[in-house]
Structure formats: structure tokens, C-alpha cells
Image (tube, rainbow, N blue to C red):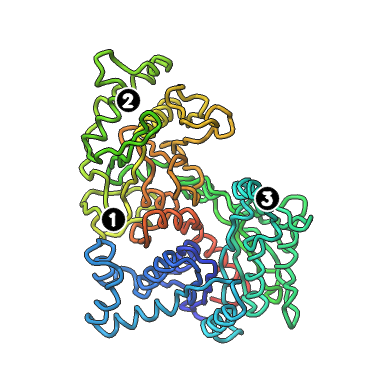
Amino acid sequence: MSRNTTVPVIDIFAGPGGLGEGFSSFEIGRHNPFQVKLSVEKDAYAHETLRLRSFFRQFSSGKAPDLFYQVLKHTFPLSELPERLKQESESLWLKWQQATDEALQAELGSSEETHKVISKKIADAIGNHKSPWVLIGGPPCQAYSLAGRVRNKGIKNYRFEDDQRSTLYLEYLRIIAEHRPAIFVMENVKGMLSATHENQKLFQKILSDLSNPPAASPKLTYQIRSVVDTESTGKYKENDPRKFIVACEKYGAPQQRHRVILVGIRSDLGDIELPPLNSTPAPKVNDVIAGLPRLRSGLSRSRRNGNYVRFSDSSDSWIESIQSQIGLNDSNGSARWLSDLDEELASLIIKTASNLKKPRSDRGDVFIETDKLLLDAEHTLYKWYTDSRLGGVCNHQTRSHLDSDLVRYLFAASYGKKYGISPRLNQFPAALLPDHKNASSGKFNDRFRVQLGNQAATTVTSHISKDGHYFIHPDPTQCRSLTVREAARLQTFPDNYYFCGPRTEQYSQVGNAVPPWVARQIAESVWNALLNAGKVG
């Protein structure tokens, strides 16, 4: 096979397409050997994101049409794009049709009829079984995650065995058995390592099933490999399943995201080498997001005497609210709770609040035009993130917070800046504790977590769509949680990767994704495995 070989990729449980983006962006020279032929996702908004990104990938580097960028700049809504492409040219319309064919909105495991539709789509996409192709995807992980299992304990009569999300890997397994990929890549949370199903370690069962897909005819076997541990070849090591955990911060991602990555290599390809990922330093949070336009948080309402009172959401109201809670507008001086703090920390908080100003971009927008350099040109991921044709930043808009949360964010960010750690709730002044009975119980001691500017971020999860308390911006002058674009930067999505839908849904998409930069490195390892097997070259 020539160096211009194209290896089909099928992406199931695709989410917004983090794994697919990594595979499709991997290059050999100027050639992208992996081509996503089909991506399957049930969520309507994530599917819109996938389809738009698929359209972008129909063009070689730098050749996407202006109409694509006009959607990102919100010149017109995405819903108008197909008609505008059709009016522009037949070739652009055909590219959109190709993207529509590639991105399928469907729910795996929902019905036998749906499975037949998806199975036929896969068969049409991969064509000849004799050519190598790759299956990628991560079955929904909520039932496996440690946080999800804690939440599920509070659900009356909940049984893990009855939760459909706990067995969706069987849909992944079924596709393997039916279509026999040369290599598959399966991603999931590390909580699956300790989950049990019908009194059996779930991970052990998954490894056994993936190694020998029970429904395959004729017989089919895979060697399950780790991309980070060269000793985990061929056989599952029951004594240490942690060898399959990929710590993303060790591979150049600015985030402490730890995920289980299983690579299955079809046994008839031989006992081939799967090169491990090369460890590289993680960028710091500030290295990645500090160059984005500064914003203020929105101001929603305040609780007064047990009732909520709405504010006028203006920059003046925002500044006044923060300063009044610090006591700067009070003739009696600073708020009493500041006296409980270390003098330097109290001074930092007072100085920050005293000098608050309206950011030029205020609360941000769906698109902010700017000619300012959004990332240091010397940054190792500069070329990965940036797009000179974009001329700004999209998905960069803040949400609204209670006035009391603004001061908690100010305190947490100031604490992180001074001490280099995020404060636990028992380190907050009593006056800043949330007004609920569990505030001092110790059960929610990390209720407010600032992302520290001088290290990699904590794991960006789907919980970021809720209230943002775990994802406080490190800059004390902004008093807010992260925007979708900042979370996307921490997840290593390029700046021209547009997330569709309402902002809450955008957050969910980003939080559920695989970091594309890490996925690209996994793609390189998979390519070299195919090269070692003599299937590409």
C-alpha cells in the first residue's frame, strides 16, 4: 500500500468528536492517513457539532470556505448554511451532503432496527473487509464513574445491572464481532476498573469479551494492548489493570484527565508492536487560557432575607456588588470576615476588588472579533490551537452567578494565587460559606475549586455544565467560572472547533470529550502498529 493510503475510521458513541478529531488530524507528511467515514452520536446538539466539523474536514488545510467561518462568527445561523452553500456552488453543496452522510444521529442499543441501520452504514463505509480499518469510541461512562456511582446510590431501587449505560460496551462489542476491525480503540473512565456487574469485576469481563468476541463467526480474537505500558501486550494483567490508564497531563495536555484506553489488535495481524505514547510536559492553565479576552461574570440575583432579588446585569452592578460585599462601599471599612484571613491574602482581595474595571469584551459573546494574539506563538500547541482566518474567538461567553458566588470566586482565585492550592470549604471564612446545611459537614469540602494557573487543570467533566463551582477562573479580577472556549482549550480542541447548541449543552459536549491532542498521539501509535503489521506503508 502506498504512503497515500487512507484507513477508514468508524467513530461510535462519538460525542462532539474528540477521538475522531485526533485521528483525522494525524499526518504523514502532508497526508492524513485516517479518514472518519462514519461517526454515530445520539445527542442532537453533539451531532450538529460533528456534522459541522465533518464539513470542515472535507477540505484540505486552509481551504475551508468563508461560509464556514461566517457560521463561527455568527454572521448567520448554522441552520442557513446548507442553503447558502447550495447557492454558492454545487461542489460546496456536495461537500455538505458528504458531511451529512458521515455524521449519523442515532442511539446505539435503542432497538434492533437502529442497529441494522448503523450496521449497514458501517458496511458501506468500510467497503472491502480485506483493507484495514479502525473502530474508535467510548461507550457512555456515567454508570462506571465514581461520581456517578455515588449519585446512583441515592436513587431508590437503583441496580447497576439494570442501568443500560453499564452494558453499552456490548454494542461496541457487537460491532467488533460483525465487522472485524483490524484495530479498535475503546476509551472510558478509570472508574470502570473498580465497577462490578453481577458480582464480577466489570473490567475483567470487558477484557475477556473484547479479547474473544463471543458472537463472532468465524472465531475472532484480539490482543488487548496499552498505549502507555509496553509490558501490557497480549494478555490482560489481572493484578494491575491500571496499566491501561492514560494520564493526559503526561502527554502534553493541560489537564489532569485520567482515562482507560484499550487498543485491540486483531490476532491474525501477528504479534506486532504498538509503540507507546511519548511523554511530554503538560502546558499550564495560564499558558493556554490567559491570552483569551478577559471577561466578567454575569450577575443574576441575590438572596435577601430568604428571598431572591434580581439585579441589573451591568458591569457597574457587577463591580458594585463585589465591592459592597468586601465592605469597600461601607463607611465602617472592610467586611469583618477579611480580618479572619492572613493579612497578605486580605490585602490581595481588597486591592483586587478596589481596582475592578469592566473588561473590554464585557461578558463575551458567541464570537469576539480581535486581532490580539490569543496564544503565545512560541507555545508548543500554537499551530494546533490557532487559525489565522478565524480573526477572534467563538464559544467565549460567561454565565451568570449569584452575587454571593462572585465573592467566593474572588476569594478562591486569590487564595490559589497566593498559596498555589485551591481552598477547601473549611478554609473559607464563615461568612462566605454557602447557605445550606451541608456546608460545614465536610462532605462537600471541594465545593468551590479554582483552576490553578501554574499547573495543569483538574479533569474537565460534564459537571461543568451545572454551576461552574469546580471550574473557577484563576484570575481574581474576573470572578467567574470558565467559558466553553476556555474549557475547550483545556481539552485541546482547536479554536475553530465550534460547539453547537445552547451554552449548557456546549459545556456538556466539551466535558464528555476525549482530548484531541492525546487522541492524535494514539492515532500515531495505531498507524505505526499497522505499519509494523505490513498493512500500510
The residue that label 3 is drawn on is 242
The local crowd at label 1, few if under 14, some if 14 to 19, many if 20 or more residues have their Cα within 10 Å, is: some
Residue 295, how many percent across, how many down? 28, 42
**Identity, as a three-letter code, of the amino acid under mark 1:** Val
Compare marks 1 and 2 and give the one earlier in the sequence: 2
The local crowd at label 3, few if under 14, some if 14 to 19, many if 20 or more residues have their Cα within 10 Å, is: some
Closer mark to the observer between disc 3 and disc 1: 1
Q: Quick check: marks 1 and 2 in contact, CB under 8 Å?
A: no
Residue 68 position by quadrant: bottom left
Measured Cα–Cα span from mark 3 to mark 1: 40 Å
Closer mark to the observer between disc 2 and disc 3: 2
Query: Disc count in the image?
Result: 3
The residue that label 2 is drawn on is 325
**Identity, as a three-letter code, of the amino acid under mark 3:** Arg
Residue 407, how many percent across, how many down? 36, 30
The residue that label 1 is drawn on is 366
Q: Residue furthest right?
A: 199
Q: Nearer the viewer, residue 167 or 86?
A: 167
Above or below: residue 155 compared with residue 509: above
